[in-house]
Image (cartoon, rainbow, N blue to C red):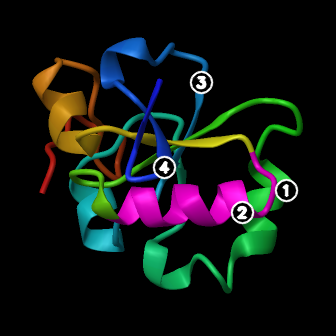
Amino acid sequence: MHFGSGVPTVEVADLKDDDFLLDVREDDEWQAGHAEGALHIPLSEFAARYGEFTEAAPQDGRVHVICRSGGRSAQVAMYLVQQGVDAVNVDGGMQVWAAAARPVVDGRGQPGFVL
């Protein structure tokens, strides 16, 4: 883990299959392709849906925040850290996830792609 611009960051290669993943991309991006098992709350709706996040997030585990390339997820990770949540930004986002041949599924559970 490293701290780029004050936000704790992890590499895709360091993620384990059972790590909690929060995807903050918009609906069209999510439908095209996402990491299976990730929680989806778009950045544009995050404040309004924060309660949904707190219900789903692990109480004593780390939250790995991901978007397309790392910009939006860095904003959410920093916000969560300020709220006392153990949150980190996934460096390079879904672009690096897909490039690393990690599984990507679409909204129907079929093989997907990153928009």
Quarter of the image for the C terminus: give it: bottom left
Q: Amino acid at mark 2?
A: Gln
Name the spot of residue 85 as percent of width and height, x first.
76, 49
Distance between the Cα atoms at labels 1 and 3? 16 Å
Report which residue position mark 2 lands on. Answer: 82
Asked which quadrant contains residue 36, the reply is top left
Q: Which residue does the image show at 25% across and 70% down from the upper left? A: 28
- Which numbered disc flags the more N-terminal residue, 4 or 1? 4
Which residue is the site of mark 3? Answer: 19
Q: Residue at x 30, y 61 (%)?
A: 71
Q: How many C-alpha atoms fall within 10 Å of the one at disc 3: few (<14), some, or many (≥20)?
A: some
42 or 87: nearer the viewer:
87
Tell me how far mark 2 sits from mark 1, CA to CA: 18 Å
Q: Residue at x 32, y 14 (%)?
A: 13
The numbered dot on residue 55 is 1
- In this picture, which residue range is highlighted in magenta? 72-85
Q: Measured along the vertical axis of the image, is residue 72 above or below residue 46?
A: above
**Structural distance between the alpha carbons of marks 2 and 3:** 21 Å
Q: CA distance from mark 4 to mark 1?
A: 23 Å
Asked if 17 appears above or below 78 in the picture, the reply is above
Q: Residue at x 59, y 24 (%)?
A: 19
Q: Nearer the viewer, mark 3 or mark 4?
A: 4
Q: Which dot, 2 or 3, sits closer to the camera?
A: 2
